[in-house]
Amino acid sequence: MRKLLILVGVLLAAHVVLLFVHPAGAASPAIDPHAVNVGIVFDVGGRGDKSFNDAAYVGGERAEKELGVHVRFIEPGDGSDREAALRIFAAEGMKLVIGVGFIFTDDLVQLAKEYPNTDFAGVDFSVATDSAGNPIPPPPNLAALKFREEEGSFLVGALAAMVGHSKKVGFVGGMNSPLIQKFQAGYTAGVHYVCPDCQVIAQYAGVTPDAFRNPGKGKELALSQYQDGVNVIFHASGSTGLGVFEAARQTNKLAIGVDADQYSEAPGHVLTSMVKGVDAAVFDAIKRVKDGTFKGGIYSYGLAQNGVRYVYDEHNKALIPDSVQARLQQLRADIIAGKIKVPTTP
Amino acid sequence: MMFLAFLSQTIRIAMPYLFASAGGVLSERSGLIGLGLEGYMLSGAFCAALGSYYSHSPWIGLAAGLAGGTVFAALYGLCSVRYKGDQVVVGVAINLLAVGITRFFLRFAFGSSSNSPRVPGFSVAETGSGLLALAHDPMIWMGALAMPVVGWVLYRTPFGLRVRAVGEHPGAALSVGIPVARVRWLAVLLSGAIAGMGGAYLALDQHQFTDQMTAGRGFIALAAIIFGRWDPPRVGLACLLFAAAETFQIRLQGASAVPAQFVEMIPYVLTIVALAGVVGRAVPPAALGKTDE
């Protein structure tokens, strides 16, 4: 018992000591009185997630360089830390506070009401709807940065159907939820637009958030689809999709990445990636604050704003014939012009 | 062909369950709740990826995964055997700790919060039904053997007899000179090692570690232990049954009228059914979870 007490004492002492340790680079002042101050709070996973958070970081960095604003980042742990992180920034007198991820939705609404003089922005903010199904606008100092994932998914669906050489194309979703169904809806519409008699095999890894981090399940879903005659699978499933890439490697078939360019996860087996321009949206919000043109409301980034796009570069050029690329560009123009309406529910 | 593909997929999905529940049975029969299985697996998976990455050998990775599971089991043993902490609380703490520590070292070692780089693994190119590829993966054989070996140890060796005695009535065991604490220590360490191999299977099969990649498999294994009534052959069958249900769900998703949510809850429903005594009584080891001796 005594030993245990001593151990606890030592740990406590170490804890207190560590409180005074400043990691390198964190020495910058909390608030720069001569610049526009911006605070960004990351989603679970934090920096290095090769996706959402990293993209938001890139946007923040770019704003710091090009606009001369002062940007600070916080990586909260799980749960209530998120709200606390937002609150710290707001209380410090930041001009703009950004929450990265739909999970911040409720906290942002609450804080925007408490701090009416601070601007807020939420990436992937999920706008609530009233009983009649009409969207409830966020508070006037809160910008909802949303993406029209279905538009980008439509294009990669058309691509999958055109290069797949199979009447079956695959889709693997993470947690079965309206957000991921949006990807599925656009993808399916894209497949059927260029190949009306093609069949889309759409599967989900589960019905809980665990379904976004279950690569073992992703791999098994993908293997069964590939065995079924599918040659291309689009995944929208977080790190579950890493299992899809592994299956593509093992069976020498193709997969399509999501959110960020995932080429490096399985070089040669990644047909393209449906990229969300989180960096551009974050940069855009900061720029508006800096220019004094920031307004609350719903900002929707689609193909037209380059908010969503598909990757076409030196890595995957060999997999996409020129005629297909030309067709995709035509489809893209048609969607932007409103000639093609992309559904948001399957 | 269809059947063979179904079979090989069921075997692959069952692997982590088999490893984890083989370890779990050993621990539970000694009176220690296997609530930390998820944590042992997660740490095993991370250490396997780490070992395989730095040594370029999946065998070293496997050994590291085994060690990783054992370390967390040692922590569990320290808290519940040495200091007699409440096993449920300790088990939950172990799982949370494993999530945090693996995430911390993931960033520390690989500079990413989502996944490690690609590491060497055992799996070979997938062709046809995939059954042939299974035969080439040594970990499949180990997983198939884990449960029979644990069963043999429990029922055919003096150590197994002691484990069972300690799990049923530690006081009586103590009175005939069985070192209760030492038997439990050994049981929990072995349990961590075997469950760690289950984690290693996950990581080496994926060729990488990803944050929280065990995704609740430790709890499915625990459910299999209860459904199999703490008897290794039955627990093994329970693992296969749960895996078959999952394969079914994968194969039929979208094609069948049964919603995915329904199939996903099968293991848990079966566990409740087993606990309720519908298919014979499920009697846990009498001293399970009790800390007094």
Image: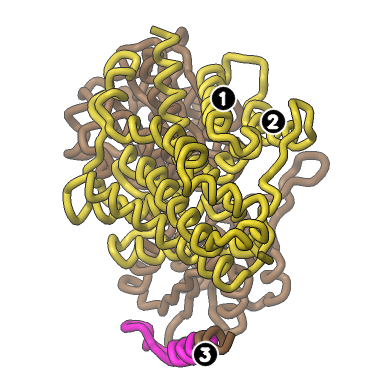
Chain colours: A brown, B yellow
Q: Name the residue type under label 1.
A: Leu
Q: Name the residue type under label 2.
A: Leu
Question: Could you tell me residue A168's position as x and y percent?
Answer: 41, 14
* Residue of label 3: A6
Question: Could you tell me residue A306's position as x and y percent?
Answer: 40, 46
Picture disc at residue A289: none
* Residue of label 1: B241
Both marks 3 and 2 on one chain: no
- Residue A27 counted in the magenta span: yes
Question: Could you tell me residue A283's position as x and y percent?
Answer: 42, 63
Of the two numbered discs 1 and 2 on the same chain, state the one appearing first in sequence: 1
Q: Name the residue type under label 3.
A: Ile
Name which residue lies at 44% across and 10% down: B3
Callout in the foreground (3, 2): 3
Q: Is residue B121 left or right of residue A30?
A: left
Q: Which of the two residues, B183 or B32, is positioned nearer the viewer here?
A: B183
